[in-house]
Image (cartoon, rainbow, N blue to C red):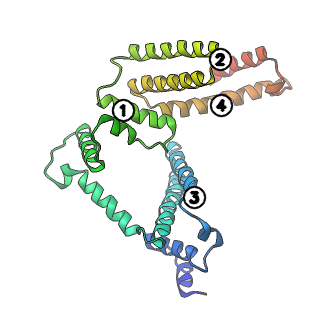
Amino acid sequence: MDINIKKITEKKRYDFNDLREIMEILRSENGCPWDKEQTHASIRNNFIEETYEVVEGIDSNDNDILKEELGDVLLQVVFHTRMAEEEGAFNIDDVTDGICKKLIRRHPHIFAEVKASTSEEVLNNWDEIKKEEKKRKTATDNLRSVSPAMPALLRAGKIQQKAAKAGFSYSDMKSAVNKINEKYQEICEALKEKDPKDCEDEWGDILFAVSYAIKLAGLEPEQILYKANERFIERFSIMEQIAAEQGKKICELPVNKVEEIWKKAKKVK
């Protein structure tokens, strides 16, 4: 057995340097066939999935899940960094150096002479420093900076937030709701005309308008939809139980009966 592998396998507790070494072993000439084959692109989705599993740990208030999933995210960081190191692009120390410098630069109220006594002032400073770093000169540059890889609903909220800072927002909730009603009428017109492109555009516009109204109410669209998804599953489960009591599956019931048991489920949950 290789001396490094023997040393690794005999440890009772591991630290970050051990994780780096394990990844180096897995990617080495005699390492794991699967790990050696991977590229940044091939494990791209793994990073997304692991991030959502961290969020699951947060939402469920489960520290065991959170600890495990944070480990999986850290693995993704080390995995990508090891591949970059093999290419001569950068290493984990470069990554650490970069984030440390960014934190110091973007907290001038801690590490320099800038004053910021509230969270709002801190965020405003952060945005201004980020604009300078990224050489963003216009409000449109700020909007385009929101990553297109983000889930669309989350991205919509970020774009709306930046647009509001630039002076584009509804003055009140009534105006926002009126915009939703306006978009609903436009959808109805598009459906009458049976124009697929118009229908797609108008459905997108109403989703964006609803998201804007939710943000204006001080709520998070992503969280609201998350809760709606969970609520729907609970109600569907109740519907399934009611149907089973009648010796049926939901798909075997007539539409009016399905609507009836849906109303019953809504009263329960």
Kindly report which numbered mark, 1 or 4, lies closer to the viewer in this rendering.
1
Sequence-wise, which precedes: disc 3 or disc 4? Answer: 3
Q: Which mark is residue 43?
A: 3
Query: What amino acid type is highlighted by mark number 4?
Result: Glu
The residue where tag 1 is placed is: 161
The answer to whether the residue labelled 1 contacts the one labelled 2, judged by CB atoms less than 8 Å apart, is no
Helix, strand or loop at mark 3: loop
Q: CA distance from mark 3 to mark 2?
A: 41 Å
Quarter occupied by residue 165: top left
Q: CA distance from mark 2 to mark 4?
A: 35 Å
Query: What amino acid type is highlighted by mark number 2?
Result: Lys
Sequence-wise, which precedes: disc 2 or disc 4? Answer: 2
Q: CA distance from mark 3 to mark 1?
A: 31 Å
The residue where tag 4 is placed is: 234
The residue where tag 2 is placed is: 194
Query: What amino acid type is highlighted by mark number 3?
Result: Ile
